[in-house]
Amino acid sequence: MDGSPATTLTRPALRADELHPSVTDPQAGAMNFLNEIMSQYPDAVSFGPGAPYERFFDEVDVGAYVDRFAGHLRRHRGWDEPAVRRLLFQYGPSRGVINDLLADALRRDQGLDVRPADIVVTVGCQEALLLALRVLHRRDDVLAVVDPSYVGVTGAARLLDLAMAPIPDTGAGPSPDELRRLWHEVRAGGRRLRSLYVAPDYANPSGSRMPEEARRELLRVAAELDVLVLEDSAYGFTAAGEGLPSLKALDTTGRVLHLGTFAKVCVPGARVGYLVADQPVELPGGRTGTLAELVATAKSMTTVNTSPVSQALIGGMLLAHGGSLAELGRAKAARYRANLTTLIRALRTHLGAPDPGRVSWNEPDGGFFVTMRLPVPVDDALLHVSAAEYGVLWTPMRSFHLDGGGERDLRLSCSYLTDEQIGEGVRRLAAFLADPRCH
Ligand SMILES: Cc1ncc(COP(=O)(O)O)c(C=O)c1O
């Protein structure tokens, strides 16, 4: 008798309740669910993922960009061929190898005065979030998150067993009054409100953008309460014109950690992001270091270093655009704004003006997302109706909220669709919204 079936039968199943709860959390699973439903309905138009427009990938010549970065090392650092190859193919510094280019770009584009050593180049913005949270938070510290929030931050906090509390998004970012209220509540419970996660430019999923005065007010309150601010700038590049100053650029008290990604302005497949953490840290023994140094130590214990080949690709792309993040994002931003305009126009054509008594939506002028409110609960069952009977997909918003909320809301992402797909998708969405189950 062949022993293999018996081996299979006797292998004990692991129990989910004995694993870390973060990996079976329903909110963490929401994105997997979306991927599953997309593969189940391949012909549906999907307003689901906030992924980049794929035709941008056609112009990415990896070899040419890596060569460009290698040429930069030869010319500007005087490196010979073995040194260039070592940098590309050997283990590298945890802090990164394109930090000087990044510091120049942040100075040129945002007026940020940071040294290359104040930056850690990470495996996407996701690792920057995870590392920043790991380094800043002790066991009982509380993380405030703007609510609704990007699932990447709440998921990372769950992975680290951090306590979290929501701060409602007013449409102009997190409410400073709520931040104050929460701070007192947390302190009354004997804990410390350590940091606040916020995405001031066209947040995912809300599309909210903080006006400049709201940014200044938030920084004032954060300084008053001694709370650190994690600023996620993923969609800042989509603003028309100069854009608003980042929280980091307005920060006069050194409380902002600035996080960025090359996923949207270059390619997500490179997995390159960064964290600016220039805060001085008093170290044991009397030496003063920087937070970036400690984040790099944490990184050396997670991913060791971000792939230098990926960093070279990103470095080459930056150099090809005059060393400017803004230049790198300019053509792409125009495309994303055009997609958003197409989506909003199509919604108005098919549904009329937003009507809070029926179906309403916001109309941001940047970012990847529009959020829509229905008169009925928006859940996975309704998404199945939309996919199976009307051929259109979207993301239920409830998974972006910490403690309830968003039950009647859905997110529409238009970043990776063509004009035709957006038009067809909205036509199908309008038909779905006319279904009695949506009233
Ligand atoms: C708010 C926000 N931050 C960061 C990212 C990108 O992270 P990464 O660089 O890890 O791809 C995304 C992508 O969806 C996002 O929406």
Image (cartoon, rainbow, N blue to C red):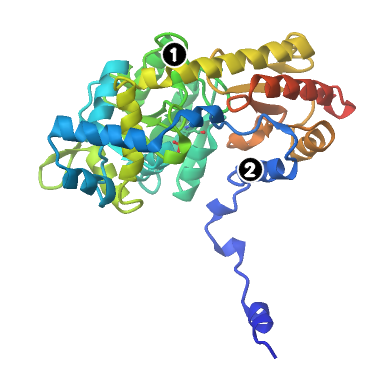
Q: Amino acid at mark 2?
A: Ala
Query: Mark 1 highlights which residue?
Result: 214
The image quadrant that residue 214 belongs to is top left
Residue 321 appears in view? yes
Give the Cα separation between the discs numbered 1 and 2: 31 Å
Q: Residue furthest left?
A: 286
- The residue lying toward the viewer, choosing from 414 and 358, is 414
- The residue lying toward the viewer, choosing from 275 and 413, is 413
In which quadrant is the C terminus drawn? top right
* Position in image of residue 105 (x %, y %): 29, 22
Q: Amino acid at mark 1?
A: Ala
Residue 279 appears in view? no
In which quadrant is the N terminus drawn? bottom right
Count of numbered badges drawn on the protein: 2
Return the mark for residue 126. Answer: none
Say few, some or many: other residues with alpha carbon within 10 Å of mark 1 (under 14 / 14 to 19 / 20 or more): some
397 lies left or right of 222: right
* Position in image of residue 367 (x %, y %): 53, 20
Q: What residue is shown at x 65% (from left), y 82% (from top)?
A: 4
Q: Secondary structure at mark 1?
A: helix
* Position in image of residue 246 (x %, y %): 37, 18
Query: Mark 2 highlights which residue?
Result: 30
261 lies above or below 241:
below
Q: What residue is shown at x 14% (from left), y 41% (from top)?
A: 80
The image quadrant that residue 433 belongs to is top right
